[in-house]
Image (spheres, rainbow, N blue to C red):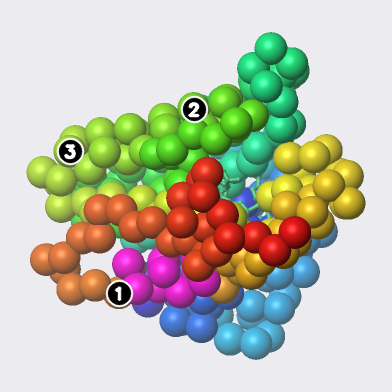
Amino acid sequence: MKTAIVTGATSGFGEAIALMLAKNKYKIIITGRRADRLDALKARMEAEYNVIVHTLCFDVRNREAVEQAYESIPETFKPIDILINNAGLSLGFDAIDKGKTEDWDNMIDTNVKGLLYVSNVVIPEMVARKQGHIVNIGSVAGTQVYPKGNVYCASKHAVDALSRGMRIDLMPHGIKVSTVNPGAAETEFALVRFHGDADKAKAVYAGYEPLVAQDIAETVEFIISRPAHVNINDILVMPLAEADVNNWYKVF
Ligand code: NDP
Ligand code: 8X3
């Protein structure tokens, strides 16, 4: 039985990916900062899918906490075969002259440095075993830029570059690196971006059919189930209504 770790499993894509992994009978480590949600998801996965689940509650921005969390993983959940680097967020929706530096710090620390810290603790055992698969959740914002997206887009461009770099460096060790770049998906993403303003968050998904978390979980399911000689380098998954980040068919 293979083991997977999913960061940011307390909502949205991460939760749906964790449930997909449970359906496929992986042993699963779920992480996030909200312990109550981790506990509820663990109970659900164990009850519905009869799998074993381990929870790790930590902030990916805290390098020491990441290292301690990794050290605390029980032997039953090692080695780790699949790492899903999903934890991430956007904060604020401001032109560059109006942006808040604390939002910028949080996005860069979470989306870029957090992904690196988690990868840093997981990769060495994959290298030692000459196998493993890392799936980074990027974004369409990792290859395109839209008004007021500035720092969030920059952080996801960094994820794109890091994924390419990881793939080159880890290929000689037989480790797969894939990137999933979703377009607009209705999760808690917009609620977080607008600092809890539910009306503004709802407006992001009005007038068209956005992606849902399940769409991304199914994409990851495809990626991790390819034969050993096949790697999906990256994949762009968009709602039909979003041709690219600046071209929409919304009904206003
Ligand atoms: P959600 O807000 O629903 O989920 C984000 C997850 O990330 C939560 O589980 C949250 O857990 C976790 N997280 C955020 N910050 C931290 C942190 N500092 N430490 C640990 N965990 C953290 O959003 P999505 O599911 O939509 O987002 C998942 C990923 O997908 C992100 O990387 C996002 O950028 C990306 N994405 C989203 C798109 C969308 O339109 N929704 C489109 C393209 C990409 P907790 O709060 O418990 O810590
Ligand atoms: C989230 C999608 O279009 O808001 O990464 O950047 S978008």
Residue shown at the point (81%, 56%) measured from the top left: 202
Mark earlier in primary sequence (1, 3) = 3
Predominant secondary structure, magenta span: helix
Give the label, 2 or 1, closer to the camera.
Answer: 2
User: What residue is shown with label 3?
Assistant: 168
Depth check: give the residue in front, 103 or 140: 140
**Mark pair 3, 2: CA separation:** 21 Å
Q: Who is closer to the viewer here, 184 or 36?
A: 184
For the N terminus, which image quadrant? bottom left
Query: In the picture provided, is 94 more to the left or to the right than 107?
Result: right
Residue, disc 1: 225
Asked if disc 3 and disc 2 are in contact, CB closer than 8 Å, the reply is: no
Q: Give the number of the disc on residue 154.
A: 2
CA neighbours of label 3 inside 10 A, class few (<14), some (14 to 19), many (20+): some
Q: Residue at x 49, y 34 (%)?
A: 145
C-alpha distance separating marks 2 and 1: 30 Å
- Element carrying mark 3: helix
Quadrant containing the C terminus is bottom right
Label 1 near ligand 1 (CB < 8 Å) = no
Q: Is residue 117 left or right of residue 235?
A: right
Query: Dot 2, crowdedness within 10 Å: few (<14), some or many (≥20)?
Result: many
Q: Amino acid at mark 2?
A: Ala
Residue lying at the far top in this picture: please name it: 97
